[in-house]
Image (cartoon, rainbow, N blue to C red):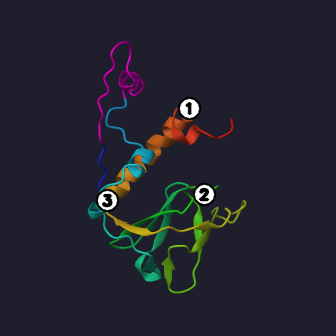
Amino acid sequence: MLVVVLAVLTVSAGSGVSAAEAEADDNAGHEGRIDVETILNNPLDPSEYQDAERCISSRDYRRIEVLDEFNILFVGRRKTWLNRLRTRCAGLEQDMIIYVSQRSSRVCTHDHFRGAERGGFGIPTPTCVLGDFERIDEGQVEGLRGAIVSEREAARRGGGPAAEGDGG
């Protein structure tokens, strides 16, 4: 089971405003909010994770759901796998259809895919590469969705990581 643990550090300074106090002021009103970057950048001890799977059978999932340009879900009847892409998949959006280039009846790490808009309009994404498959439960899926929505809202307000590097 993928579990997120956050550590809180206390910083004390001799005089003036400490970095921790400044950060607390910046985060006022956002208690309990965890962003995607925090979740993904705070790995647990390897014993806390289930083993990642390199491949899953095409029969084990019914649909592919895009979370963002870095994460997609393979959703089956009773199982869900998170796939953290090898690199950012530029242009990948939540409502896109995913076309995986499979070499067998399984979808595997390093397989290529492209995202395309529903209805066939628009330019498909560049070729993107799948990462390992991690089994996650429904609670973890909802946690990821919520964190991604929070990050997008923060970016729209001009304060989140997604806003950095947008070029304008």
Q: Secondary structure at mark 2?
A: loop
For the point 60% across and 57% down, the residue is: 92
Q: Is residue 91 above or below residue 124?
A: above
Mark 2 crowdedness (10 Å alpha carbons): few <14, some 14-19, many ≥20: many
Q: Is residue 120 above or below residue 7?
A: below
Q: Where does residue 83 sit, x and y in percent of width and height?
A: 46, 65
Q: Residue 14 occupies which quadrant of the picture?
A: top left
Disc 1: which residue: 158
Q: Label 3 sits on what residue type?
A: Leu
For the point 53% across and 68% down, the residue is: 130
* Magenta part of the chain: 7-29
Q: Is residue 14 magenta?
A: yes
Q: Give the main secondary structure, helix, strand or loop, of the magenta stretch.
A: loop
Chain-order first, disc 1 or disc 3:
3
Near-viewer residue (65 or 168): 168
Q: Where does residue 114 sit, x and y in percent of width and height?
A: 63, 67
Disc 3: which residue: 2
Q: Is residue 157 magenta?
A: no
Near-viewer residue (11 or 48): 11
Instruction: Give the farthest residue toward the top.
Output: 15
